[in-house]
Image: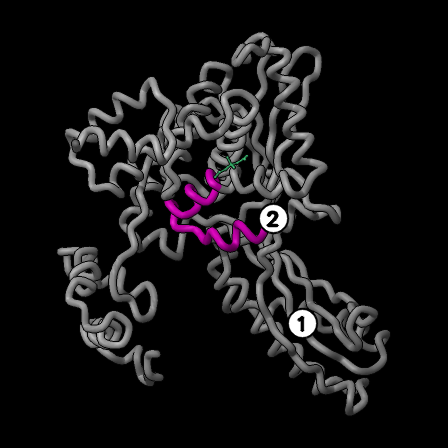
Amino acid sequence: MAPVVSGFSKLSKDEKINWLVKHHFNNDKNTIDIIKTYWNSDEKLQQLHDEFTENTISNYYLPFSVAPNFLINNKRFTIPMAIEESSVVAAASKAAKFWQSRGGFNAQVLSTTKVGQVHFTFSGDIEKLNIFFKNIKSDLISSASHITKNMEKRGGGIIDIELRDKSLEIENYYQLHCTFSTVDAMGANFINSCLEQFADFLTKAAAAYIKFSESEKTIEIIMSILSNYVPECLVRASVSCAIDDLPSKDNLTPLQYAQKFVRAVQIAEIEPYRAVTHNKGIMNGIDAVVLATGNDFRAIEAGAHAYASKDGKYTSLTEAKIENNIFHFSIQLPLALGTVGGLTTLHPLVKLALNLLGSPDAKKLMEITAVAGLAQNFAAINSLITTGIQQGHMKMHLMNILNQFQATNEEKQKLVEHFKTNTVTHSEVVLQIEKLRN
Ligand code: MEV
């Protein structure tokens, strides 16, 4: 077992690596080589990455890919995607190509409101608290003017603050439920700074409020933090086409294909075991764009899954239907994304990704990202209801298996050719490698 270490973060990078290798890798020199292989030779760039977090010892690469041919609101996009799962980008590209000749994707932002809360306890007369809140509300908002000044210049700021009574659920528990517009920023720092200011103002104002008794004057702030649940920061994307324009695949007529597709989505609507996997496939596309554009994929994941259970039961984020011989497929979900601040101005690949998308504002990025999720879901269901998922998946996974066996370029070429007409399974690939090598 490694010994307890103090002051680890203050060690130099080399000292940290030496400690790690001594206590966890038996002083194995090869481990040091692996860590250093991923260092960037450009020292300034490496330092930039080192300083993103604490205790950085190396870089962890993900493939940075692009999926072309996305027609969104009549404009063509090549979408950047950072993801390791083999078949995701191929699936997105395939769906993009399919829909670009059928009118493309429509997308629109429905709302952009972000939320933050000050959670506090107050023991006393609720009516007095309500009156106190009404009295201080406008001063409470203006107490944050030094923080909101710049955001207001950009068209954003505080939308409202409500006092919410939660004392039936937890004794003496109340909230300031605050709503914000953060325009093109994701806004976490802005919101959290405002909330901490509100908390400070609230406690001081309560202590000075003459109509409060001594115990009422002591409001206890439990915490002040933004919420990643943003059901009013919503985007919708959709596709539609005549049934006859759908594929006739796997012995299915276009109508049978559409009906089977709709049935597959209905299953995800009513069956949580399926819904979670269905939505995971959607998040394959969404997270990849969120990561490539320097946004916080954990926030997006948490918000999306919470939204999927907003009616008390976890369900599909997409919907499909047939109406008047037209197939309709759509997604609606919250996406609190930013195109300014955070990594967007720091990480060279993030900057490149945003440039590739034509330097979108946050709303445009919400639309593009929702489309990536819808495309991913379309591709997954298309495979699931026809060939099955493994055919495409294993074809893309083939290269991973070949790399596991350190196949040479010549071996790769031969085996990729072989598996164009043969089913890829792990054991079959191993067999063919052995055959080649013998
Ligand atoms: C795999 O990463 C994602 C899928 O399982 C999604 C789905 O089943 O819809 C293929």
Write down the region rendered in magenta: 284-303
Quarter holding the C terminus is: top left
- Can the viewer see residue 414 in this picture? yes
Task: Inspect the image, locate mark 2, and give the three-letter code of the amino acid beneath it.
Answer: His
Q: Is residue 213 above or below residue 138?
A: below
Task: Inspect the image, locate mark 1, and give the three-letter code of the amino acid beneath it.
Answer: His
Horizontally, residue 166 falls left or right of residue 399, namely right
Residue 7, horizontal then vertical, whole percent: 31, 84
Closer-to-camera residue (270/312): 270
Residue 23, quarter of picture? bottom left
Number of numbered discs present?
A: 2
Closer-to-camera residue (404/285): 404
Horizontally, residue 126 falls left or right of residue 368, namely right
From mark 2 to mark 1, how far is it between C-alphas?
23 Å
Q: Residue at x 64, y 42 (%)?
A: 273
- The answer to whether residue 288 is magenta is yes
The 10 Å Cα crowd at callout 1, few under 14, some 14 to 19, many 20 or more, is: many
Residue 166, horizontal then vertical, whole percent: 78, 68
Question: Farthest front residue?
Answer: 438
Q: Residue at x 32, y 20 (%)?
A: 420
Q: Magenta stretch mostly in which secondary structure? A: helix
Q: Is residue 36 above or below residue 412?
A: below
Task: Residue under label 2, please give it.
Answer: 305
Closer-to-camera residue (36/426): 426
